[in-house]
Amino acid sequence: MRVQQPHPPILICGNGPQLLTLAAKEADIVGPTGTTFRRGGTEPNLSAWRAAVVDDRVQLVKEAAGDRYERLELNALVQRVVVTDTRRKAAEELTRRWTQ
């Protein structure tokens, strides 16, 4: 059996410390996630995407990766795009809906 060299990049996404640590040590691309759902899976809760929480997740990845960190790609999945002429209003509506 031949192994492809270089191998396709490995992407690991997650939110918990154990999975992010594994991703930092083994993956080529690390995707911190944060979206959880409440109310039976219909209402997104984006509290884990607050700046301080994202900073903590990235710091965890950085510490776990050690020397590998400079070679890692960090990934964020954009789950909502709004095309509008009233950006502030659209942002405020999304913030109200997703941070309740």
Image (cartoon, rainbow, N blue to C red):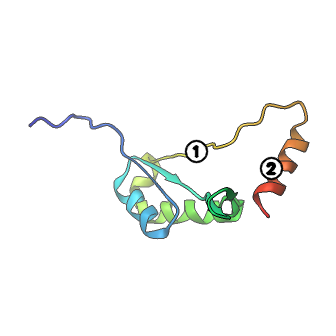
Q: CA distance from mark 2 to mark 1?
A: 16 Å
At 60% across and 66% down in the image, what residue appears?
Answer: 56
Quadrant where the image shows the N terminus? top left
Q: In the rendering, at what x and y percent does residue 47 appear?
A: 70, 63
Task: Give neighbour class at mark 1: few <14, some 14-19, many 20+ (Cα, 10 Å).
Answer: few
Report the front residue among 37 and 92: 37
**Closer to viewer: mark 2 or mark 1:** 2
**Kind of residue indicated by mark 1:** Leu
Q: Quadrant of residue 100?
A: bottom right
Looking at marks 2 and 1 on the same chain, the residue that comes earlier in the sequence is marked by 1
| Labelled pair 2, 1 in contact (Cβ < 8 Å) | no
Is 88 on the left-hand or right-hand side of 66? right
Please rate how many residues cluster around mark 2, counting C-alpha atoms within 10 Å: few if below 14, some from 14 to 19, many from 20: few
Residue 68 in which image quadrant: bottom left
Left or right, 1 with respect to 31, comes to left
Specify the amino acid type for callout 2. Answer: Leu
Q: Name the residue furthest front.
A: 40
**Label 2, on which residue?**
94
Q: Please name the residue shown 61% across and 57% down the image.
A: 35
Residue 53's disc number:
none
Q: Residue at x 77, y 61 (%)?
A: 99
Picture coordinates of residue 97 (x, y %)? Answer: 80, 55
Q: How many marks?
A: 2
**Residue 77: mark in rendering:** 1
SS at mark 1? loop
